[in-house]
Amino acid sequence: MDHPIQKRRLSLAIIEAKGLTYTYPIGAKPAFEDVTVKIEKGEFVLLTGPSGCGKTTLCRCFNGLIPHFYGGKLEGEVTVAGLKVAESPISELAQHVGMVFQNPENQLFALSVEKDVAFGLENLGVPREEIREKVDWALKMTGIDDLRSRPPYELSGGQQQRVAIASVLAMQPEVIVFDEPTSFLDPLGARQIFEVIRSLNRDLGITMILVEHRLDLTARYAHKVMVMEKGRIALDGEPRKVLSSEEARLIGVGIPKATRLYNYLKANGASLAEIPLSSEEAYQAIKELSGHD
Amino acid sequence: MIKVEDVYFSYPNGVQALKGVSLEIQDGEFVAIMGQNGAGKTTLVKHINGLLKPARGRVLVDDVETAKMSVATLARKVGFVFQNPDHQLFSETVEEEISFGLRNFGFEEKTIKERVDWALNLLDLTEYRGVSPFMLSGGERKRVALASVLAWDPKIVILDEPTIGQDSQQKERLRQFITQLNRQEKTVIIVTHDIEFVAECKPRVVLMALGKIVAQGGAEKILTDPDLVSQASVVLPEIAQIFLKLADLGFPREVIDVYEAGRLLLERFGEAT
Amino acid sequence: MSMFDGFKFRSVSSPVHRMDPRAKFFYVCVLFAVAVMFNHLVPLLVLFVIQIPFVLVAGVQKEWLRSMKGSALFAILIFAMNVLSLYFYGGYESLAMILERSLAMTARFVVLIESFSIFFLTTSPDLLGLALEQSHVPYELCFAFTTAVRFVPVLAEEAQTIMDAQKARGLELEGGNFAKRIRNYIPILIPLIVNAIRRSLELAETMESRAWGANRRRTNLYVLRAGQKDYVLILLSILLLGGSIYISAFARIPSLIEILSV
């Protein structure tokens, strides 16, 4: 089945925000201020930062939950897939930007997996045969075809989260936002989810925005890392540069161990050729170093 | 001291959660119970505070069988902080929440006041004393739940998945806090699958899989053994993964700490670049 | 409560399970009407017996027996009340007639329980939800129904966890006078309710994010189509209804005593 998203990487921003500031209805001060970001089609963006930095709030601006579901005051401009978020209803934005939330349990309503995956398409009034096609495709893409008739409470957290991803995927959005999707999963379940995210990004060209604390497993796949602190974007750039920076260390994000090792060695006079983001890269770099020994 | 002697346990739906588990935990130890979801970790620790009673075998806390004690009696000695603080919080103010346990255990009003002040201070919650717990952020609610358990000063503290949803700074604070508890000679048991956190805390590790204990020992020994780790369906810490591969370059295998790793590498390559 | 056990859907597949819930519901309604039509024991016993094949074909004997057992207490109560009221206020009927009439009232109650039990035991909640949708019940209600059913096991588990968590803080749930016991449940109820509200907020976020309300004409992955068996059941039900109306209006129904003395 052909995915309608363009595979060529044009330098087109799929999400653009300028001077975005948001205050919750009962908030005394803004949840985030003066945020300017540009996310290109097909990018895999990692959004991280300490608790309360505003990353969860920011990602809800991308599909319209803010301002339409939460109310409050949104200043500045944010455009997603050509639509102005403040002026488009969530039901329209949801067709371009899908969202996967933290708790797998609360994203599944139906009594069978395939009915859950069909939910969004049913809401859109898509004809039955087309729903069937897209559901089958989404189940295959997330590797849960064999679970299609199972009820949600029989599934593990990791399986449930894959159902949530399939439900979003079935609507074929250009962007998928993940808000700490592995918080409740064990390491193997988390790995599986990151694998799915990575393969969807790589094979289908879907733009991914992943809000995460656990950077050990995800930094290696990202094209861009954005670090937020106290409601502002503190760092925005290439993962290796951002995560090995002193500022990242001071802000207190979960820098991958491999990168921390690199920093430690560098601070003590031993430089690895490349900044590693994963254990494999660290091993390769150290091996090279030993080659010079 | 906690003694688990060949315990078997099945849930009413028929699932055999523990199949002959034996374990000893000395006073003042710091133990991490690890394994995949469904391995039996939470089932095991629920036997220590008496929420579950063994079908076969015994569990003894300070030489008294848990089967002979009510949960409320055991809870005085064994504090259990559940994974989700929202399963415990119900009071109108943080202060009331923390005094809940103290009231249940029959402390005097004067003592309750003292202990509440102490617990608030210990977990940096004094400014929230009169605030409703429901108004606090996720991390703050976790601290309130912890404070409400520590308030009655249990000898043994069990934390079920304490690092879920926490950022690195919060985890570091937790790590230091556990060290503090150990220094006060409290026994701390954590149930977790957060490998990196365990790699930083370096407790004694008990690995479980399918209702049995697969291995136990120091964190460096257990978490660097790929066979054991895969048996328990856990993953190796990142540093351990690096050093597993570096073994053929003559490096020691049992390394899980970043600084230790860096030190070893500097020794070898020091001024090479 | 064991009476409610007999209403819980069991996930098995049988011809009865696969039948259109609308046909089954029509049949249950007809049965209800017919049961109310008759005061005599004999037809009510007949109604009781004709449902047993359904139970056997559907393979839900165990659960059905459990619901019968559970309703036994009520049945005995109804029987006793009828006997007493007929004896003291019923007019000068023989003791045997009083017993038979009371048994008839009891049988009516049992028949009703039996038919509803069979219906719920053999109809999966999602099929039921689908039937509601196709019967033009507003989608919001159908959705609320299936979502509620889907979360029953989740909430039950959460209630248990909350009880454990509070017991671990020294809360005693047993013992003490009535007022104290009610008060002791507050630490259980509040987290349960608060979490339910939080959960529904998260669900709402998800619903919005899946384009809820995008199209006023919602489509469905599944479609319920009545089959041969369903039409046969509907036909039989209509015949049953018609026949019963005729019999109760024009025929004289013998009492069990009369039949036995022949």
Image (cartoon, coloured by chain):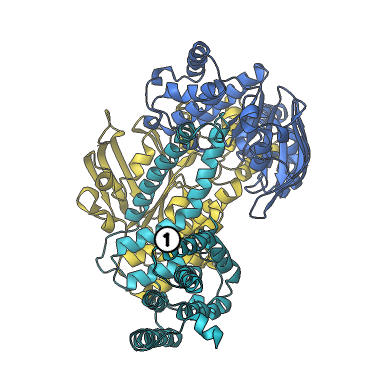
Chain colours: A yellow, B blue, C cyan
Disc 1 residue crowd, few under 14, some 14–19, many 20+, Cα 10 Å: many
- Say which of A102 and B210 sits in front: B210
Q: Quadrant of the C terminus of chain A?
A: top right
Q: Is residue B69 visible?
A: yes
Q: Give the residue drawn at x 31%, y 64%.
A: C139
Q: Nearer the viewer, residue C190 or A22?
A: C190
A14 to A50, vertically: above or below: below
Q: Quadrant of residue B72?
A: top right
- In the rendered structure, the answer to whether residue C254 lies left or right of residue C218 reads right
* Residue A183 visible from this viewpoint: no
Secondary element at image label 1: helix
Single out the residue that lies furthest toward the left.
A87
Residue A162, image x and y in percent? 50, 57
Q: Quadrant of residue C60?
A: bottom right
Residue that appears at 31% across and 56% down = A94
Q: Amino acid at mark 1?
A: Ser
Residue identifier under label 1: A167
Q: Nearer the viewer, residue C133 or B101?
A: B101
* Picture coordinates of residue C258, whole percent (x, y): 50, 84
